[in-house]
Image (cartoon, rainbow, N blue to C red):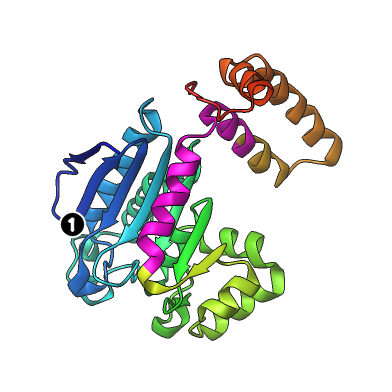
Amino acid sequence: MSQREVDSGTDELLAETRGRVAVLTLNRPRSRNALSKGLSSALGKLLRQFDEDPQIGAILLTGAGGSFCAGGDVKNMAQSAVANLTFDERVADLRESQRRVWGGLVAVRKPTIAAIPGAAAGAGLALALACDIRIASESAVLITAYARVALSGDCGIAWLLTRLVGFSRARELMFLSERINMQRAEALGLVNRVVPDAELQDNSLALATLLAEGPTFAYGRMKDNLDHALTAKFQESMDFEAENLIRTELSSDHQEGVRAFSEKRKPNFNST
């Protein structure tokens, strides 16, 4: 598998490609990978870059030093540049950051995987939930965290939680701000798979590689269908699916998939 480092513009975000997988590693281990302004900016930029790169088929997001992401950098909030802005300026600044990172992650049309080696809290939990699939180590913990510092939540956490666990559970998780172990997280549907700590890296990369070698164009249309279904009526959803089904039916990947099926071999998908 070919491997290449990618310049993220900051030491706080490590980036590399492994075959058709882009691996992004949050790299502020001393602060449990809390999100700084520079880290967020670099992450948003590379998410767009890899989504547009035809050589990339999937994006794997993880954290260094045994944590996924502790959310916002609470200790430095009071000293941050936005502390002296007006209310409206602070709202605008937060909205822009949210759209660039969390909005950008949800907008990616390629499969996205969060590999969670440890704590994912607050905005960091939202970052994991914004990925398509979450695979976590047995010792990882999730926590909404906002109530503990008297904040209401941001980065799409309300939208993501409500759709993943439902109306009542989302309120429970936000209000109580309890530490969620992986047994409960998997039962709630917050994570897709739980693996032994030592196997997280290999398992998550294997899953990302499997998806990266799949039908990228069809995956994108699947994501369109699933996103549309969140707000559409049944008939509207079927009509929308019909258009995308025909689009994928006309693709070279579909033709290759049919040939591979007939020839009893692994397909070689290459459309984007």
Residue ID at (25%, 59%): 85
Residue annotated with mark 1: 12
Residue 36 lies in quadrant: bottom left
Picture coordinates of residue 143, whole percent (x, y): 46, 77
Does the magenta run of residues contain 209? yes
Residue 89 lies in quadrant: bottom left
Picture coordinates of residue 76, whole percent (x, y): 20, 72
* Mark 1 crowd level (few <14, some 14–19, many ≥20, 10 Å Cα): many
- Regarding residue 117, the answer to whether it shows in the image is no
Residue ID at (28%, 67%): 34
- Regarding residue 112, the answer to whether it shows in the image is yes
Quadrant of the image for the N terminus?
top left
| Foreground residue among 151 and 177 | 177
87 left or right, relative to 215: left
Q: Amino acid at mark 1?
A: Glu
Picture coordinates of residue 226, whole percent (x, y): 67, 42
Does the magenta run of residues contain 126? no
In this figure, what is the number of numbered marks?
1
**Which residue lies most toward the front here?**
264
Q: Is residue 229 above or below residue 80?
A: above
| Foreground residue among 156 and 240 | 240
At mark 1, the secondary structure is: loop
| Foreground residue among 69 and 265 | 265
Picture coordinates of residue 65, whole percent (x, y): 24, 70
**Which residue lies most toward the right here?**
235
230 left or right, relative to 103: right
Q: Which residues are magenta?
A: 199-223
Q: Is residue 189 above or below residue 265?
A: below
Residue ID at (70%, 69%): 167
Q: Main secondary structure of the magenta part?
A: helix
